[in-house]
Image: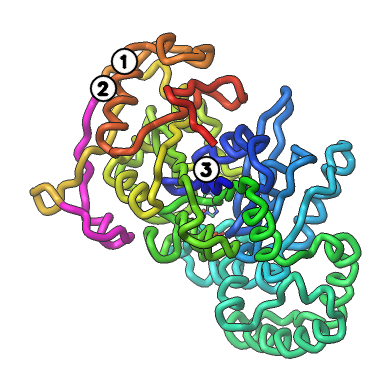
Amino acid sequence: MTVVVIVGSQWGDEGKGKLTHYLGPDFDLVVRFQGGSNAGHTVKTHGETYKFNLLPSAILYPDRTCLMADGMVVNPARLLDEIKFLKKKNLWGDNLRIGSHAHLVMPYHILLDELEEKRLGGRAIGTTKQGIGPCYADKFARLGIQIGDLLHPSALRERLGTVVELKNAMLKGVYNHDEPYSVDGLYDNLMRAAETLGPLVVSSVETVRGHIEQGNSVLCEGAQGALLDVDYGTYPFVTSSHTVAAGACLGTGISVSEINKVIGVSKAYTTRVGNGVFPSELTGETGNHMRERGLEYGTTTGRPRRCGWLDLVLLRYTLKIHGCTELALTKIDVLDGLKTVKVVGSYRKNGSTSTITEISDRQLSQCEPVYEEFKGWEGPISGARSEEELPPELVRFVDFVEQEVGVPIRMLSLGPDHDETVWRIPKIQI
Ligand code: IMP
């Protein structure tokens, strides 16, 4: 039995989908444990590119069970679209299961997300407007609707009545929104969704525990990145779930002691979508180089991503919080052709070297990055299949990062395709 967690070690979009899809065939069960359609996972395989917001990246392996576990928030309309797409392409393997305690993202969550961002104006979070924050807020206020409720229509209708009354009052009172939601309309839509989704609903805990107890291997696929964690990220400019590796336990029912490996994923540079502090952000030519070469536009929203140098102060922090046993360094090819490559080695605050004791938007805003510089490499590197085929400048860069963060870098991703990968010895072993 092996339980592996793959997690983002920056502000999301690190390339977790490629690694999950790559390792997927080695696992019996692949689980998403937090977030919802705010995530965007791109998987490139057999010359085709697939983008999923909700489905686990291993969904294209029909003989592997994919679970959207209890910690997730699920927009039923978006999920039905993704299932429909796979069915149309003849790729639907009926291998999806959904944890009964996962919460439903309702239309009023999406509207509240939009209205609240508008109300915040210049202080907006820059959310994906997928209703994620309002849905998790309802979960913790015990006002949520769980996907398992779809199987109990009369109780669901009664609960909707109580919750929708409050939502309509809030929409009118706080946001002056005059179009109340109808309980009947919401209920009818949910009942239609239940025809397809109802048969997929299972107990997350039973599913996961069943696999573990049979000695099967389980892969937990994180969404977003540690710096967007609601407690350990750059609050308040974060998402509303636990994106750190421990979130895999909270969101699935796997116990902490059952996790064997935590693989952190980081780009060779940094990106961020949405607002908030970004000490190594590049607004000029080099940032544009990264954005255009790296196709740094949001999978969910299409927004251009902010780009900057790799930040080792932040990476050291996130790898510790995750408890990473190894690191995958991705999109290295994007840096091809740059004369100089930099990383943040430390921060300066009020003129002297600063020790970071906590990560928050406030704390980081007061820090100035101190860079280490490396000679760049020519490229293209995407054709390399072993470390010996890589330019020595790049090997020096990777060795430096590895030494600084104190976690072995096993996988170097040199492009979106599966085979554009160099495994450093030893390859990640499952
Ligand atoms: P929310 O998750 O939509 O509430 O957005 C909160 C913050 O997290 C915003 O800055 C988003 O841009 C960011 N965010 C959410 N999901 C992702 C993701 O999958 N990749 C990168 N950033 C994300």
Locate residue 260, reporting x and y percent.
Answer: 48, 48
For residue 328: magenta? no
Locate residue 35, reporting x and y percent.
Answer: 59, 59
Q: Say which mark, if any, is on residue 307.
A: none
Return the disc, 1 or 3, that comes first in the chain's sequence.
3
| Residue at point 59%, 46% (across, down) | 219
Q: Which residue is mark 2?
A: 374
Hey, what amino acid is under mark 3? Asp
Which image quadrant: the C terminus?
Answer: top right
Q: Which residue is mark 3?
A: 13
- Vertical comparison of 64 with 131: above or below: above
**How are the residues colored?**
rainbow
Return the disc, 3 or 2, that comes first in the chain's sequence.
3
Whether disc 2's CB lies below 8 Å from ligand 1 is answered no
Q: Which residue is mark 1?
A: 393
Mark 2 packing: few (<14 Cα in 10 Å), some, or many (20+)? some
* Discs 1/2, front: 1
**Secondary structure under badge 2?**
strand
How far is disc 1 from disc 2 in space, using C-alphas? 8 Å
How far is disc 3 from disc 2 in space, using C-alphas? 24 Å
Q: Left or right: 28 with respect to 303?
A: right
Hey, what amino acid is under mark 2? Phe
| Residue at point 43%, 9% (across, down) | 389
Out of 53 and 328, give the one closest to the viewer.
328
User: Which region of the structure is painted magenta?
Assistant: 355-373
Hey, what amino acid is under mark 1? Glu
Whether disc 3's CB lies below 8 Å from ligand 1 is answered yes
- Vertical comparison of 30 with 182: above or below: above
Q: Left or right: 174 with respect to 339?
A: right
**Secondary structure under badge 1?**
helix
